[in-house]
Structure formats: C-alpha cells, structure tokens
C-alpha cells in the first residue's frame, strides 16, 4: 500500500510556536496567574494560624517560591521548551516522571481556572447588586462567556493575550497600592485599629506554631502559579534573558503585594471576619468608606481574576500540547495552528473541562466541592514543586557548571533546593491536617494515571525524539 501524500495534517507537525515574548510578557504571565490570590484566598491563613501566623506564612511560603523561581530560572533558561517542568523531567529523569509532572501542571492550572470562573461569577453578582439589577440574575453564563473569550484570545496568539495580561495585571497591582495610599497606611494610628493584634481579645498566634504550619497551605495563594513562567520558554525571543528577568521581577512584585495586602486587611477588618471573607481587599475598600476605592478594588479584583484565568489557559494548554507532541498523549493534541502558531487543539480541548469543574459545585448544590477543586489545584502544584528538588540536583550532576551555557546560575547551591524541599514537606503536612482525605484521593488518582501511562501509552513514546534541548551528552553517559 502506498503511503498517503503529505497533507496539512502532516505539515503541521513541522510548525513551531512563535518566538515573540519578552521579559514583560513573562512577568505578566507569572504575576497574572497569581495576583488573584492577593485579592482572596490568602485570608484563610488567619483562620488557621491567627494574624501573626498569617504574616509568617506569607513570608515563609514566599521563601519557598523564591527558591522555586531561582531553580526554575536556571533550568528553564538552559532547557527552553514548552511544557516547562515537564520538559525538564523528560530530559533529566525519564518518561514516567515527565508524564506525571505534565499531568500535575495541567490539572493545577485547569482547576485554578475553574476556581477563577467561580470567583468571577461571585464578582459579577456583586457588581449587578451595586448597579441595582434585579435579584436572581445568574452570573455563571457571563463567567463562562469570559472564559471562552479568553480561550479565543489565546487561540489567536500568545503575544496579544499576554500583552493584554500585562495591562490588566499591572492595573490590579496598582489598585493594591491605591488602597494602601487611600487608607493612609503609612499612618496606622489615623484610621486603622489592627484588630486581632492588639486589645483584650487578640488573635496573634491562637494555636501556636502548629497553627502557623497549618496556615502554610493557604499561604500558597499569595504565590501559586508563578512557576508557570517556564511554560512560555519556547515562545521567548531570548529565554535565557526573559525567564530569569521576568520571573525574578514577578516574585519581588508578589512579595510586596502580599505584605501590603496583609497589612491593609489586618488594619481594617476584624479578624473574626477576615478569616472567612470571600473578597477581603474589596471589603477593606468598603470599610474605608470611599466610593472611589470601592470601584477601584472591584475592578482590580475582576482584572486579577481575568488575568489569572488567561494565564491558566496559556499554561495548561502548553503542558498538554507538549505531552501530545512527544506522544505521551495522543499526537492529535500536539498540533500547531498553521496561521496563529498556537497549540490550538490543546486550548480548545481543556476549556470545557475547566468550565465543567467550575459549574459542578452549583449544579450539585455542593459548595464544599469547590474547596476540593481548589485543593486539587494546590496539591497538584505542590507535587510539581517536590519534583523540582531532586530534578535540580540531577540537572547539576548531568550538566555541571561550565559544561553548558546558562542564562542564570542559582547561587548558594544546595541551600535553595534544600529549603524548597523542607518547606514543601511542611505544606504537605499542613494540607494533611485539613484535607487528609482529599490528599490521599489525589495521590491515588495520580498513581492510577501512572499505571495507565505505563500500560497504554509508554509504547508510543519515541525516546530519542523527546531530547530536543541543544545540550551536550550528559556527564557519565
């Protein structure tokens, strides 16, 4: 039988993603995904560890992510491929680990996107109330439409989508600065009462250091997703420059935002309310009794949520696309659009998955299901962070300093990697304290997925074709 003539389906295999991104776009991707955590989610640390426990969690978990960003910058600037940590795993460890890491990334960002859709629905409901709309208006169709619109934006091109992400992320960050200025945060005696830190009923460290450790789980919301900058490495004009600069600027931005967020919320909201609030920064603006701040923070929260959803679509699709391109998944997912040069099939495939997890808690009338979705995202990310520790040691062993060109060199090795490992273990323990059953269920899910990969997909993987980075033969091989 004659082989079919090459057609469009065959030609698309040779297409590559466009190299159009700069450090500004990397900053927009990393901070854009995360900044929504400054507007909501982080405040559950107050319920777990008290007011001081919340601040300690913000800074200690910030150390975890700083270590992660530095490790990520060295490896990604050397292995600049779509898929980020997945691409690293296939070069340094092997197919089974690579498959798991790719799945961690896809599930973490897809579940986070679903959580963003829920938050967007809540914000649109609040907005309709402020505008005097009739009660009973369902915001979910509008949230779904927003997700579809962002997916279409990603479908059309990464440069435009991340340029828009830069604008809305920068605006959201500036609203936090505006809130600090608006309440005269430099003069806490003026209109801040720092509830929970002073007075007869203080809530500084109500559960001691075990409460601080328990707060680490939600302290991740300040930074969860910054590692996604690695997903765009293949689309950078110069990955060795863009990834380190964009990622380092991103983590500095987030640490500043986290500190300001805790300070203004602790200064104006009662700790009893802050520990359970849905949109704490928006509530701070309302307590400040300023119409301008209320409008700014509502728009800032909306922009942060949209930026996060946009970044999640970008990152999840790159991980899924990369696995398809390497045949860890059906090769159909590894296609590049012939005109827009985007992983269009991966983008389109994952959108209904995210929307389904977003509306499932409402359809089943089960609000606790949303917390399960969020925990799934956190734990999937945490499993990926845990992988980064042995991966970096192996990367340095296979390609020691001086053997390959690095865009960034991690200082003080091995201290950052060891710090990342210790802090990741503490966050796992903190999660087990509150969500032990969910943790075990997620581990069981990934175990079964690993069995499926070994039994059903491993035979399709072309081992030689997956080593795409321009690296010399590893030391010892």
Image (cartoon, rainbow, N blue to C red):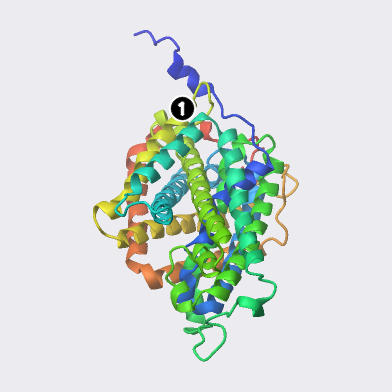
Q: Residue at x 47, y 35 (%)?
A: 321
Residue 121: % across, % down: 39, 51
Q: Quadrant of the C terminus?
A: top right
Neighbour tally class for label 1: few under 14, some 14-19, many 20 plus, Cα within 10 Å: many
Residue 176: % across, % down: 61, 60
Quadrant position of residue 99? top left
Q: Is residue 10 left or right of residue 30?
A: left
Farthest front residue in view = 132
Farthest right residue in view = 402
The residue lying toward the viewer, choosing from 439 and 208, is 208
Asked if residue 393 shows in the view, the reply is no
Q: Residue at x 66, y 65 (%)?
A: 181
Asked if residue 125 shows in the view, the reply is yes
Q: Secondary structure at mark 1?
A: loop
Residue 89: % across, % down: 53, 46
Q: Residue at x 48, y 59 (%)?
A: 382
Residue 291: % across, % down: 55, 61
Farthest left residue in view = 364
Q: Which residue is mark 1?
A: 335
Q: Residue at x 72, y 52 (%)?
A: 409
Q: In the image, is residue 402 above or below residue 161?
A: below
The residue lying toward the viewer, choosing from 380 and 164, is 164
């Amino acid at each position: 039988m004659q082989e079919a003539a090459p057609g469009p389906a065959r030609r698309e295999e040779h297409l590559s993603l466009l190299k159009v991104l700069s450090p500004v776009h990397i900053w927009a991707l990393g901070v854009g995904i995360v900044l929504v955590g400054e507007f909501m989610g982080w405040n559950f640390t107050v319920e777990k560890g008290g007011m001081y426990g919340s601040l300690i969690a913000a800074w200690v978990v910030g150390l975890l992510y700083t270590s992660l960003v530095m490790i990520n910058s060295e490896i990604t600037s050397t292995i600049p491929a779509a898929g980020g940590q997945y691409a690293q795993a296939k070069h340094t460890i092997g197919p089974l680990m690579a498959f798991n890491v790719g799945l961690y990334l896809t599930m973490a960002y897809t579940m986070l996107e679903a959580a963003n859709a829920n938050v967007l629905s809540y914000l649109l409901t609040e907005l309709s109330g402020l505008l005097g709309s009739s009660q009973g208006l369902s915001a979910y169709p509008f949230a779904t439409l927003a997700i579809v619109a962002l997916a279409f934006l990603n479908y059309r091109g990464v440069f435009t989508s991340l340029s828009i992400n830069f604008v809305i992320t920068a605006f959201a960050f500036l609203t936090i600065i505006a809130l600090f200025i608006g309440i005269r945060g430099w003069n806490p005696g003026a209109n801040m009462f720092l509830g929970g830190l002073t007075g007869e009923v203080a809530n500084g460290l109500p559960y001691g250091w075990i409460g601080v450790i328990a707060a680490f789980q939600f302290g991740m919301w300040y930074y969860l997703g910054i590692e996604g900058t690695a997903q765009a490495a293949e689309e950078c004009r110069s990955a060795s420059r863009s990834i380190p600069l964009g990622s380092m600027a991103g983590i500095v931005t987030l640490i500043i935002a986290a500190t300001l967020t805790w300070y203004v919320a602790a200064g104006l909201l009662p700790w009893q309310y802050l520990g359970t609030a849905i949109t704490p920064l928006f509530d701070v603006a309302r307590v400040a009794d300023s119409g301008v701040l209320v409008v700014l923070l509502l728009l800032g929260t909306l922009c942060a949520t949209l930026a996060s959803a946009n970044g999640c679509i970008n990152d999840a699709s790159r991980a899924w696309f990369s696995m398809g391109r390497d045949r860890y998944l059906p090769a159909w997912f590894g296609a590049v659009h012939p005109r827009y040069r985007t992983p269009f099939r991966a983008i389109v495939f994952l959108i209904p998955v995210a929307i389904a997890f977003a509306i499932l808690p409402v359809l089943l009338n089960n609000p606790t299901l949303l917390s399960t979705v969020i925990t799934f995202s956190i734990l999937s990310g945490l499993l990926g962070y845990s992988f980064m520790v042995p991966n970096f040691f192996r990367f340095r062993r296979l390609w020691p300093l001086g053997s390959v060109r690095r865009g960034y060199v991690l200082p003080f090795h091995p201290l950052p990697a060891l710090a990342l490992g210790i802090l990741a273990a503490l966050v796992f323990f903190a999660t087990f304290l509150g969500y032990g059953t969910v943790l075990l269920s997620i581990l069981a899910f990934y175990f079964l997925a690993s069995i499926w990969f070994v039994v059903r997909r491993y035979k399709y993987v072309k081992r030689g074709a997956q080593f795409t980075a321009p690296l010399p033969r590893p030391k010892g091989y």
